[in-house]
Amino acid sequence: MPGAATVTAGLALLAYAVVNADEAGRASPATLAAGAAALVLLALFVLVERRATHPLVPLAVLGRPSLRLANTLAALWQMSLFPMFFLVSLYLQAVLGHEPVLGGLALLPLCLVVIAVAGRTDRLIARFGLRSVMGAGFVLVTVGMAWQSLLSADGTYWADVLPPSLLLGVALPLVSITTTIAATLDTREEEAGLASGLINTSLQFGSVIGLAALSGVAATVTGASTEARGPALTDGFATALLVGAAPAVLAALLVPGLRLPTPGMADVPERRRTAS
């Protein structure tokens, strides 16, 4: 219970500090107090876990480089892609004038692409290796986010939203499946549940941080614009989407550092090259 309470409260306060920074300011007393309390609680969580007989998260598991990096990569792709759904939906409604239902349905083709690619991702991993597929996925996220940022106030769904969203639909299962596999490769059978819980926590936390940060970017750019409402909103959404490509760029640079501890399906091509 002490571990669960401290880590939950610490992460919640950290997320609140990031969200509140956009509204009250980064140097506001409420933001600084929430951030400081979050750091204290997370430090306390580490101390509790070190002394607990049956810790919620054994620190030895967190000491494994491949698991730590996989969780970081999972958080990064969520920071890029999760806010995209929100921002594009707002663009379709607030700028192009679509009804909310149509704004939601407009992203349905992306979801269909995700389903189609997800069913074939295991074959891609078996053929090209886990790192190669993961790296390609993050490159596609980067390109897709940059492409999606080319919005215009007088644009259309078919020209401005659909093409890049389909590319992101290809990228999403590549990064989500590979990071989940990487996070569970370096664990024993009895640790599989813990590894799955950690990767899900990273995904959720990445989505919260990404949405708060990119929404703040969009609001700041729109608020500083002197143009009419439509162009000002478009500038805000476009800038936020472009900034959203940055976590994917960072992730793509980190992928080569991922070390796969256990030979398996993910590294079949690499083992063949080593044998030859």
Image (spheres, rainbow, N blue to C red):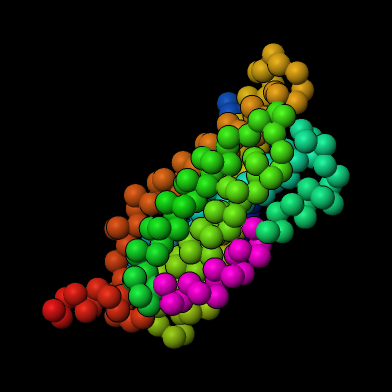
Look at the magenta stretch and give its main secondary structure. helix
Q: Give the left or right position of residue 243, taking residue 222 as reference.
A: left
Magenta-drawn stretch contains 222: no
Quick one: which residue is furthest to the top in this view? Answer: 226
Check the image and report above or below for 214 versus 273.
above
Image quarter where the C terminus lies is bottom left
33 vs 57, left or right, is right
Where is residue 159? Give x, y as percent: 65, 41
Instruction: Give the camera-side residue of 240 and 157.
Output: 157
**For the point 82% across and 37% down, which residue is it?**
97
Residue 270 to residue 42: above or below = below
**Which region of the structure is painted magenta?**
110-124
What residue lies at 45% left-to-right and 58% top-to-bottom? 137
Q: Could you say which is closer to the camera, residue 136 or residue 266?
A: 136
Q: Is residue 117 left or right of residue 137?
A: right
Q: Is residue 22 above or below residue 197?
A: above
Q: Position of residue 25 (x, y in %)?
A: 63, 27
The reply to whether residue 121 is in sight is yes
Query: Measured along the vertical axis of the image, is residue 145 above or below residue 74?
Result: above
Question: Image quadrant of residue 169?
Answer: bottom right
Rendering coords of residue 195 (x, y %): 48, 72
Find residue 72 and report its image quarter: bottom left
Direction from residue 74 to residue 233 in the image, left or right: right
